[in-house]
Amino acid sequence: MIRIRSVAAAHPLITGVAMLSAVGVLVFVLVYFQPQKLVIDDRVSEPLPSLASGAGSGTDDGAAADGKQGEPAIETLSRGDFQSFEHSTTGQARVIRLADGSRFLRFEQFETSNGPDLRVYLSATPAEGPGETFDDDYVEVGELKGNIGDQNYSIPADVELGRLRSAVVWCERFSVAFGAAPVG
Protein backbone atom coordinates (compact mmCIF):
# COMPACT_ATOMS: atom_id res chain seq x y z
CA MET A 1 0.00 0.00 0.00
CA ILE A 2 1.28 3.41 -0.98
CA ARG A 3 0.93 6.16 1.54
CA ILE A 4 0.67 9.77 0.33
CA ARG A 5 1.50 12.55 2.74
CA SER A 6 0.63 16.17 2.15
CA VAL A 7 3.46 18.63 1.56
CA ALA A 8 2.30 20.58 4.60
CA ALA A 9 2.52 17.55 6.83
CA ALA A 10 5.86 16.52 5.37
CA HIS A 11 7.40 19.97 5.57
CA PRO A 12 5.94 22.14 8.35
CA LEU A 13 8.72 24.65 7.72
CA ILE A 14 7.41 25.21 4.18
CA THR A 15 3.92 25.83 5.51
CA GLY A 16 5.20 28.34 8.06
CA VAL A 17 7.29 30.18 5.47
CA ALA A 18 4.33 30.29 3.05
CA MET A 19 2.03 31.70 5.72
CA LEU A 20 4.60 34.25 6.82
CA SER A 21 5.12 35.30 3.18
CA ALA A 22 1.38 35.72 2.67
CA VAL A 23 1.14 37.92 5.77
CA GLY A 24 4.14 39.94 4.56
CA VAL A 25 2.53 40.53 1.16
CA LEU A 26 -0.73 41.61 2.83
CA VAL A 27 1.09 44.07 5.11
CA PHE A 28 3.01 45.47 2.13
CA VAL A 29 -0.21 45.99 0.13
CA LEU A 30 -1.94 47.71 3.07
CA VAL A 31 1.01 50.01 3.80
CA TYR A 32 2.17 50.84 0.27
CA PHE A 33 -1.06 50.89 -1.76
CA GLN A 34 -3.37 51.85 1.13
CA PRO A 35 -6.54 50.42 -0.47
CA GLN A 36 -8.46 51.27 2.70
CA LYS A 37 -8.30 54.94 1.68
CA LEU A 38 -10.69 54.20 -1.19
CA VAL A 39 -13.49 53.80 1.36
CA ILE A 40 -12.37 56.41 3.91
CA ASP A 41 -13.08 60.10 3.25
CA ASP A 42 -11.15 62.91 4.91
CA ARG A 43 -13.44 65.96 5.13
CA VAL A 44 -12.12 69.49 5.58
CA SER A 45 -14.08 72.70 6.12
CA GLU A 46 -11.67 75.61 6.38
CA PRO A 47 -13.01 79.16 6.20
CA LEU A 48 -11.48 81.75 3.91
CA PRO A 49 -8.13 83.11 5.06
CA SER A 50 -8.12 86.48 6.81
CA LEU A 51 -5.54 89.05 7.82
CA ALA A 52 -6.09 88.40 11.50
CA SER A 53 -5.06 84.75 11.41
CA GLY A 54 -3.29 84.33 8.09
CA ALA A 55 -5.47 81.31 7.35
CA GLY A 56 -8.59 81.66 9.46
CA SER A 57 -12.02 83.06 8.79
CA GLY A 58 -12.83 85.97 6.55
CA THR A 59 -15.52 87.25 4.24
CA ASP A 60 -15.70 87.22 0.49
CA ASP A 61 -18.31 88.58 -1.86
CA GLY A 62 -16.75 87.32 -5.09
CA ALA A 63 -14.46 90.31 -5.67
CA ALA A 64 -14.16 90.66 -1.90
CA ALA A 65 -13.98 94.39 -1.54
CA ASP A 66 -14.47 96.11 1.80
CA GLY A 67 -16.54 99.16 0.88
CA LYS A 68 -15.70 101.06 4.09
CA GLN A 69 -11.94 101.05 3.65
CA GLY A 70 -11.85 100.91 -0.16
CA GLU A 71 -9.26 98.11 -0.14
CA PRO A 72 -10.02 94.53 -1.07
CA ALA A 73 -10.00 92.24 1.96
CA ILE A 74 -9.52 89.26 -0.35
CA GLU A 75 -8.74 89.60 -4.03
CA THR A 76 -9.28 86.65 -6.36
CA LEU A 77 -6.30 86.50 -8.73
CA SER A 78 -7.54 83.48 -10.68
CA ARG A 79 -10.00 80.63 -10.52
CA GLY A 80 -10.76 77.49 -12.43
CA ASP A 81 -12.78 74.29 -12.29
CA PHE A 82 -11.13 70.95 -11.63
CA GLN A 83 -11.02 68.34 -14.33
CA SER A 84 -10.40 64.67 -13.67
CA PHE A 85 -7.33 62.66 -14.57
CA GLU A 86 -6.74 59.32 -12.78
CA HIS A 87 -9.67 59.83 -10.36
CA SER A 88 -12.92 61.78 -10.55
CA THR A 89 -12.17 65.28 -9.21
CA THR A 90 -14.62 68.19 -8.95
CA GLY A 91 -14.73 71.65 -7.41
CA GLN A 92 -12.91 74.90 -7.95
CA ALA A 93 -9.40 76.19 -7.27
CA ARG A 94 -8.82 79.88 -6.53
CA VAL A 95 -5.65 81.86 -6.05
CA ILE A 96 -6.41 84.69 -3.63
CA ARG A 97 -4.41 87.56 -2.15
CA LEU A 98 -5.07 89.27 1.15
CA ALA A 99 -4.57 92.99 1.69
CA ASP A 100 -1.19 92.29 3.35
CA GLY A 101 0.02 90.59 0.14
CA SER A 102 -0.10 87.02 1.42
CA ARG A 103 -1.43 84.54 -1.13
CA PHE A 104 -3.34 81.30 -0.85
CA LEU A 105 -4.50 78.51 -3.08
CA ARG A 106 -8.05 77.66 -2.03
CA PHE A 107 -10.10 74.61 -2.99
CA GLU A 108 -13.87 75.10 -2.80
CA GLN A 109 -16.60 72.47 -3.10
CA PHE A 110 -13.69 70.13 -3.72
CA GLU A 111 -14.05 66.38 -3.98
CA THR A 112 -11.78 63.61 -5.23
CA SER A 113 -10.88 60.05 -4.31
CA ASN A 114 -8.70 59.53 -1.29
CA GLY A 115 -5.33 57.97 -1.84
CA PRO A 116 -1.82 57.53 -0.52
CA ASP A 117 0.69 60.39 -0.44
CA LEU A 118 -1.49 63.07 -2.10
CA ARG A 119 0.15 66.46 -2.62
CA VAL A 120 -1.02 69.86 -3.86
CA TYR A 121 1.08 71.38 -6.62
CA LEU A 122 1.07 74.59 -8.58
CA SER A 123 2.38 73.44 -11.96
CA ALA A 124 3.66 75.13 -15.10
CA THR A 125 1.76 72.52 -17.15
CA PRO A 126 -1.71 73.67 -18.28
CA ALA A 127 -4.65 72.00 -16.53
CA GLU A 128 -5.48 70.10 -19.72
CA GLY A 129 -2.23 68.18 -19.33
CA PRO A 130 -0.59 66.02 -20.42
CA GLY A 131 -1.03 64.53 -16.95
CA GLU A 132 2.40 62.95 -16.69
CA THR A 133 4.09 66.39 -16.97
CA PHE A 134 2.50 68.11 -13.97
CA ASP A 135 5.56 67.21 -11.90
CA ASP A 136 8.11 68.50 -14.45
CA ASP A 137 8.03 72.14 -13.26
CA TYR A 138 6.02 72.74 -10.11
CA VAL A 139 5.87 74.14 -6.59
CA GLU A 140 4.46 71.95 -3.83
CA VAL A 141 2.24 73.93 -1.45
CA GLY A 142 1.42 71.05 0.89
CA GLU A 143 -0.05 67.65 1.50
CA LEU A 144 -3.71 67.37 0.56
CA LYS A 145 -5.61 68.13 3.77
CA GLY A 146 -8.71 66.16 2.81
CA ASN A 147 -10.29 64.63 -0.24
CA ILE A 148 -13.57 66.48 0.39
CA GLY A 149 -14.22 70.09 1.31
CA ASP A 150 -12.92 73.66 1.36
CA GLN A 151 -9.24 74.09 2.18
CA ASN A 152 -6.45 76.68 2.03
CA TYR A 153 -2.78 76.34 1.11
CA SER A 154 -0.33 79.18 1.71
CA ILE A 155 1.70 80.18 -1.35
CA PRO A 156 5.25 81.24 -0.41
CA ALA A 157 6.06 84.88 -1.18
CA ASP A 158 8.96 83.95 -3.47
CA VAL A 159 6.77 81.86 -5.82
CA GLU A 160 6.34 83.54 -9.20
CA LEU A 161 2.70 82.86 -10.06
CA GLY A 162 3.01 84.10 -13.66
CA ARG A 163 4.71 80.90 -14.80
CA LEU A 164 2.35 78.51 -12.99
CA ARG A 165 -0.77 77.51 -14.88
CA SER A 166 -2.56 74.84 -12.87
CA ALA A 167 -3.41 73.59 -9.39
CA VAL A 168 -2.90 69.83 -9.23
CA VAL A 169 -3.74 67.05 -6.81
CA TRP A 170 -0.78 64.72 -7.33
CA CYS A 171 -0.19 61.22 -6.02
CA GLU A 172 3.51 61.23 -5.18
CA ARG A 173 3.68 57.49 -4.63
CA PHE A 174 2.39 56.53 -8.09
CA SER A 175 3.31 59.72 -10.04
CA VAL A 176 -0.21 60.40 -11.30
CA ALA A 177 -2.52 63.40 -11.26
CA PHE A 178 -5.91 62.90 -9.64
CA GLY A 179 -7.20 66.23 -11.00
CA ALA A 180 -6.12 69.70 -12.12
CA ALA A 181 -7.66 73.18 -12.38
CA PRO A 182 -6.46 76.17 -14.41
CA VAL A 183 -5.17 79.02 -12.23
CA GLY A 184 -2.88 80.97 -14.52
Image (cartoon, helix red, strand yellow):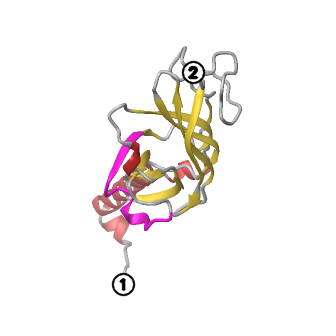
* Segment colored magenta: 128-141
Q: Identify the disc placed on residue 2.
A: 1
Residue 21 in the figure: left or right of residue 151: left
Q: Looking at this rendering, what residue extends furthest in the bottom direction?
A: 1
Per the image, is 78 magenta? no
Report the residue marked by disc 2: 50
Query: Which quadrant of the view contains residue 21?
Result: bottom left
Q: Which is nearer the eye, 93 or 70? A: 70
Tell me which label, 2 or 1, sits earlier in the chain.
1
Q: Position of residue 146 (x, y in %)?
A: 56, 39
Q: Amino acid type of disc 2? A: Ser
Q: Quadrant of residue 26?
A: bottom left
The quarter of the rendered structure image containing the N terminus is bottom left
In terms of secondary structure, where does tag 1 sit?
A: loop
The disc placed on residue 171 is none
Residue at 36%, 31% (x, y): give it.
157
Question: Circle 2 — which element?
Answer: loop
Dot 2 crowding, Cα within 10 Å, few <14, some 14–19, many 20+: many
Q: Position of residue 76 (x, y in %)?
A: 58, 38
Of badges 2 and 1, nearer the viewer stands 2
In the shown orientation, is residue 133 left or right of residue 72?
left
Q: Amino acid at mark 1?
A: Ile
